[in-house]
């Protein structure tokens, strides 16, 4: 099943219906059955004190991105199936705006942002909902220390953003789902990360999924497909309070990737010609790369070597 391109007639929005071979409606984000819903992106804290996460297992897509000092944050994307609670929620970065543009006008939940970035967020085509814009959607967990204790009620937040795009209104998500291509190299686990953050994806053949470990610690999270997408990461004009420069992750363009599914890995390529277009993953022969239906993890890795290692089976 491929997420097709939506034709536009004038200013009318047409709704695309993605269906599997049996005619069941499926999400163009992860290929799983389900009714469409509004798109909600949530910035997730990924420092050690923020774990275990809540509600990330219900996301359709999980993006991993580098932030200051070689640490990482997650962007969890939801549509149609919402957990009761998600978090911990943390602050937005400039890179998030380019990343999310491919999803038209999603709602964005985040704890805040530095003052210089707020005008860019206000101008971006997202329905920004930090706590001050949707106070009833957020709460603090008294059993956790701040700032790792802010949690979101996704349904309450979307109630404040009725204009947020529904997933079947997005013209071009770019994902294709289906059987694995021929070839591939058996691999038991793959490690990837940044200077101060590591991720290990270990194949679980009984569950048919990649178990996710962070900084050497096992989690309850798992992915059907993992894409290690190599991108340009450059210094931005922003930084944190400690003087560390905020990285800017470029997600428009093209490059190489590694796709993990079904206990194997394949070299692949990605392309995204403009911010409004979805990211397409292709085989080295230029054919659409079929992803496995299920939660999709996309790890945005700097192009330079040394950010990933494998353990072949």
Image (cartoon, helix red, strand yellow):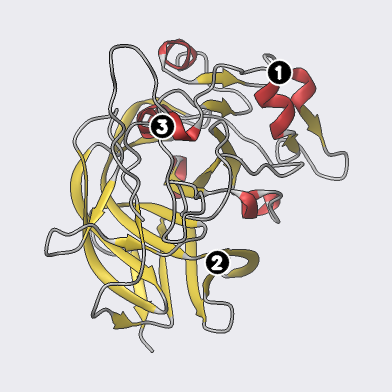
Location of residue 228 (image quadrant): bottom left
Residue holding disc 2: 212
**202 and 238: which one is in front?**
202
Kind of element beneath mark 2: strand
Percent position of residue 49, x then y: 70, 51
Q: Are marks 1 and 3 in contact (CB under 8 Å)?
A: no
Percent position of residue 258, x then y: 29, 64
Horizontal side of 252 relative to 202 (left or right) equals: left
Q: Which one is earlier in the sequence, the residue at label 1 or at label 3? A: 3
- For marks 1 and 3, give the CA distance: 21 Å
Residue at 58% x, 84% y is 206
Figure check: 148 above or below 284 = above
Q: Residues within 10 Å of mark 3 (few under 14, many from 20)?
A: many
Looking at the image, the residue that sits furthest to the bottom is 313
Residue holding disc 1: 134
Residue at 51% x, 49% y is 25
Residue holding disc 3: 103
- For marks 2 and 1, give the CA distance: 32 Å
Residue at 40% x, 35% y is 16
- The C terminus, quarter of image: bottom left
- The N terminus, quarter of image: bottom left
Which of pointers 3 and 2 indicates the residue nearer the eye? Answer: 3
The reply to whether residue 196 is in sight is no
**175 and 261: which one is in front?**
175
Q: Residues within 10 Å of mark 1 (few under 14, many from 20)?
A: some
Figure check: 21 above or below 248 = below
């Amino acid at each position: 099943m491929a997420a097709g391109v939506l034709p536009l007639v004038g200013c009318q929005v047409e709704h695309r219906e993605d269906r599997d071979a049996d005619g069941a409606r499926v999400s163009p984000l992860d290929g799983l059955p389900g009714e469409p819903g509004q798109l909600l992106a949530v910035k997730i804290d990924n420092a050690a004190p923020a774990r275990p996460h809540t509600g990330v297992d219900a996301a359709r897509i999980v993006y991993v991105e580098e932030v200051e000092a070689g640490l990482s944050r997650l962007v969890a994307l939801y549509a149609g199936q919402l957990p009761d609670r998600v978090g911990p929620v943390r602050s937005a970065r400039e890179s998030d705006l380019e990343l999310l543009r491919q999803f038209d006008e999603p709602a964005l939940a985040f704890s805040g942002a530095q003052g210089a970035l707020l005008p860019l967020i206000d101008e971006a085509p997202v329905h920004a909902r930090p706590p001050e814009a949707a106070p009833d959607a957020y709460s603090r967990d008294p059993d956790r220390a701040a700032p790792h204790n802010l949690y979101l009620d996704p349904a309450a937040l979307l109630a404040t953003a009725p204009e947020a795009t529904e997933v079947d209104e997005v013209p071009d998500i770019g994902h294709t789902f289906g059987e694995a291509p021929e070839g591939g190299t058996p691999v038991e686990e793959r490690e990837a990360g940044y200077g101060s953050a590591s991720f290990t994806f270990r194949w679980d053949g009984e569950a048919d999924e990649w178990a996710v470990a962070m900084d050497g610690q096992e989690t309850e999270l798992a992915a059907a497909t993992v894409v290690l997408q190599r991108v340009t990461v450059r210094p931005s004009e922003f930084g944190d309070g400690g003087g560390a420069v905020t990285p800017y992750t470029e997600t428009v363009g093209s490059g190489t990737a590694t796709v993990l599914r079904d206990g194997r890995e394949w070299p692949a390529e990605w392309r995204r010609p403009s911010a409004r277009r979805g990211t397409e993953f292709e085989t080295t022969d230029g054919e659409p790369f079929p992803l496995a239906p299920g939660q999709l993890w996309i790890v945005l890795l700097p192009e330079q070597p040394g950010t990933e290692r494998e353990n072949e089976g």
